[in-house]
Image: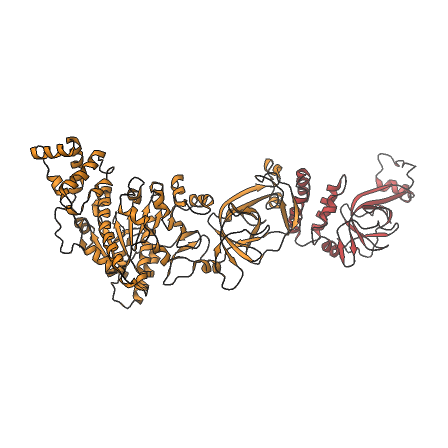
Chain colours: A orange, B red
Amino acid sequence: MVDGRMFDLGVGDEGYGEQFSPVELRSLPARAGLGVVTAGSLTKGLEIRLGAGVAAEAMAAGRYVTIEGVSSCFFGMITDVELRSAIAEVLTSPPEDDFTREVLDGTAVYAVLKVSLMLRMERSANAQPEPVRTVPGHFAAARDTSQAEIEQIFGGEDKDHFQIGSPLDMDVTVCLDYRRFIERSNGVFGKTGTGKTFLTRMILLDLIQKSAAQREPSQRCVNLIFDMHNDYGWEGQSEGPSRRAAGLKQLAGSSVMLMTLDEENARGRQVRPDEVVTIAYADVEPGDIEILKETLNLTTNAVEATHQLAKEFGQPQWLAQTLNLNENDDQTAQLLNRLGIHASTMLNLRRGLQRLTRNGFMVERSNSARPNSLIDNLLGGRSVVLEFGRYGGQIASYMLVANILTRRIYNEYRVRTEAARTAEEQPNHLVITIEEAHKFLAPAVAGQTIFGEIAREMRKYNVTLMVVDQRPSAIDEEVMSQIGTRLVCLLDNERDVDAVLAGVSGRSELRSVVAKLDSRQQALIIGHAVPMPVVVRLRDYGEVARGYESFKASLTAPTDRASDLLYNP
Amino acid sequence: MQAERTQATGRIVAASIEAFEAECFEQDAAPPLGALVVTLDGGPAIYAAVAAISTAGLDPSRPLVPHGSADEDLETVLARNPHLPLLLRTSFNARILAHQDAEQIEHRSPDAPPRLFARVRVCDDTEQQRFVSGMDFLEPLLAAGEGGDDVAAAFLRRAGRSRVDRAAFLLEAGRALVPLLSGEPERLTAILRSIRP
């Protein structure tokens, strides 16, 4: 606890060797006091001097503090902990006995918290959190933020809020605003191995649950997940003894359709998909090939040749006809000569196209009885997980299929949205989850992929993205600026940290918070769906799954039970 | 320390608003270094810390001559010269720390020196604890001249011994010393070394 003396710091620069004189201290409130405000500004945050007896090592970056102003409370996040000394000689000759060390701790040597202010709330009944536009005065008391305050700020779990985790060193839960979350595109970022997949799967389950709880159809959402590594559909990997965790299909039953590009791979994993998806040649457009330029190792001339051949042969037959061309044939040679396509260019293009068409999911003609099954399910209120099987390891296949299907879905959504005269006629809000998002949204291709268009147009046609990525610095800046809510796991690349914090108030202070996140089960959440940035200890996925089971049991509509298939510790 | 509330120790023979000198009623019966003493007569009580103690001949113009041979101890010398104690005086100097103002103890110099010939006694434990209940006494205690740090350390050690929470008191006092001596780190560390439990 702070003792009865307080120290008015003289004008100093870095804190070493400051001279100070004793000043009377206001008594701290009864809740665990940390210290008092001694310096700071609106733009750079506050400095809070820890009282004697408050251990610096107990203060963690990302922890919340409350500063008691005269007429309002300020809520902030610890972004740094700094050690300082008021007497330089103490550092050159550190004390050797415990008594002197204890005397000097908190008086001659002390810790300072750097706090980034987030919200302010008047001291009145029914007061609402507001943005911070001023600072508390000198010597305003600082303390730990209470659980009641966290609940007041973030709200409790209800049909419009879903739990995401708990703030550091607290047992209270933090909730995201469901409606605000689906209003805009969102991102899950973190370096490899930090649990992005777990976090994404948890969010998807929460979205399915909250959507089902909405009375108004316009507030419901469906999800389309392009499942690169087969982690979301039936089951995924976990760190538990069973090494497996139940996926969305297991838990949500008929609310989720499990589709696959690779039926053989699915059966090998004892997974029974609801449908097998194929991509017909006729579905491929020149723009789909263009975004794969680097992945397929195509030359610029080869990409240009794609457009020329598409123009020559017309959509939808250009791909089939291009693959049927025989360079040894006179007719082909004349055609290429007329179009100005060199033989080597044609060879490069053919190799690239064959890398795609030799995949089992590519068919010359679609033989599906339900060519629009995927769209029909989404429009019918069912989420869809599309597993890529063994093809997920080929980034070209992933990008091609995701781009083609999303373009088709987006066009359908655009038509229906523009034709709708009432809110009820609008199609269900769609959240599309894509992994390796920087491949689709890099500056060179963001203008050409449907995903770039969706991200820039926000929710113009009721479609938003959830991008999952370990290299946010490779994503186009304009696209990143449209990401509403960012869930940031540990990132250690400075450019990646800069990218996820771009446009965020107090980003320079939050950098240190991101760098100090645990490598597992911790995330910084910022943006549209939270009233202020928060570092959370993420919920355990098994707990979320069990919670969903309880929720399903309360629904009147018949659902599949999957309690036997839950994550088993 | 035993209660000595009613037993005067000496009488003031010189005084200023910063300090006073008192001659003891009995030889070698001066209060120890750092003891908290208080005036008994002549106006509001004045509190002081014993800063120096001396015993010398009554007549300063006549220096003392040592008695006894090298083989004779002190007791033998005094037994053979019983008149010697009558020729000596013990006195002590005390640094004024505070004075009584109505019901409050004001930790600053009084408006006037204590009265000459006023009696002085040592404060008992209760008075000592009340005096050091806040840390306002430290600043005047540290303002003493040469040798003042020894007085301060002795005062704090005695005050600590009068309290049940001795270690906590010394810790609190040590922390209160830091801002007062921030510009004199050597003094600070020396005093802390002297008072550590």
Q: Nearer the viewer, residue B74 or A20?
A: A20
Q: Quadrant of residue A541?
A: bottom left
Residue at position x 64%, y 47% from top?
Answer: B175
Q: Quadrant of residue A559?
A: bottom left
Find residue A256 and report its horizontal and vertical position in percent.
Answer: 25, 58
Q: Quadrant of residue A254?
A: bottom left
Q: Nearer the viewer, residue B178 or A149?
A: A149
Whether residue B197 appears in this view of the structure is no
Total residue callouts: 0
Residue at position x 85%, y 44% from top?
Answer: B90
Q: Residue furthest left?
A: A330
Residue at position x 46%, y 53% from top?
Answer: A169
Query: In the displayed structure, does residue A75 sit left or right of residue A466?
Result: right
Find residue A353 and report its horizontal and vertical position in percent.
Answer: 17, 39
Whether residue A141 appears in this view of the structure is yes
Residue at position x 45%, y 47% from top?
Answer: A505
Query: In the displayed structure, does residue A408 sit left or right of residue A218?
Result: left
Find residue A90 and report its horizontal and vertical position in percent.
Answer: 61, 38
